[in-house]
Amino acid sequence: LFRELIEILAISRNQKLPQAGEESQILELLIQRDGEFQELMKLAVDQGKIHHEMQLLEKVVEKRDNDIQQLQKQLKEAEHILATAVYQAKEKLKSIEKARKG
């Protein structure tokens, strides 16, 4: 559009013919496009902020996932220790019962 405006201005100066209607239409289009461009730029900035926030949240989620995995590992270890302790307690009870009967 800008190039067209320059060409029209150059032609009208060379031909000395006023084409004000065409020039004003192109200027209006340029102003309209500029407004659209400004809106798109604002949208891009907003989306950039949202993207940055999402990246920060993804890091928080990743840290929480790691924390959960560590807790799961600790729980499995505790479960194994408790299962071993229960088994040993049962075995002791069996040997106590045998000793009483004996």
Image (cartoon, helix red, strand yellow):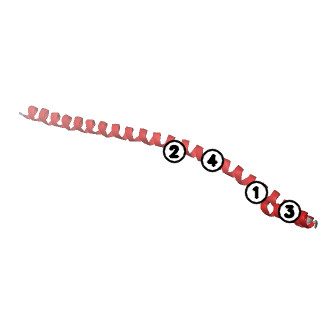
As measured in the structure, the alpha-carbon distance from the residue carrying label 2 to the one carrying label 4 is 15 Å
Note whether 61 is above or below 38 in the view shown. above
Please give the name of the residue rendered at 88% of the width and 66% of the height, measured from the top-left corner: 22
Instruction: Find disc 4 in the rendering and name its residue.
Output: 48
As measured in the structure, the alpha-carbon distance from the residue carrying label 3 to the one carrying label 2 is 55 Å
Instruction: Find disc 3 in the rendering and name its residue.
Output: 10
Instruction: Find disc 1 in the rendering and name its residue.
Output: 36
Give the x, y percent position of residue 48. Answer: 63, 47
On the rendered image, what quadrant is the C terminus found in? Answer: top left
Query: Mark 3 or mark 1, which has the lower sequence index?
Result: 3
Residue density around tag 3, few if under 14, some if 14–19, many if 20 or more, within 10 Å? few
Badge 4 element: helix
Query: Mark 4 or mark 3, which has the lower sequence index?
Result: 3
Between 46 and 67, which is closer to the camera in this rendering? 46
Frontmost of labels 4 and 3 is 3
Frontmost of labels 2 and 4 is 4
Amino acid carrying label 3: it is Ala
On the rendered image, what quadrant is the N terminus found in? Answer: bottom right
Number of labelled discs?
4
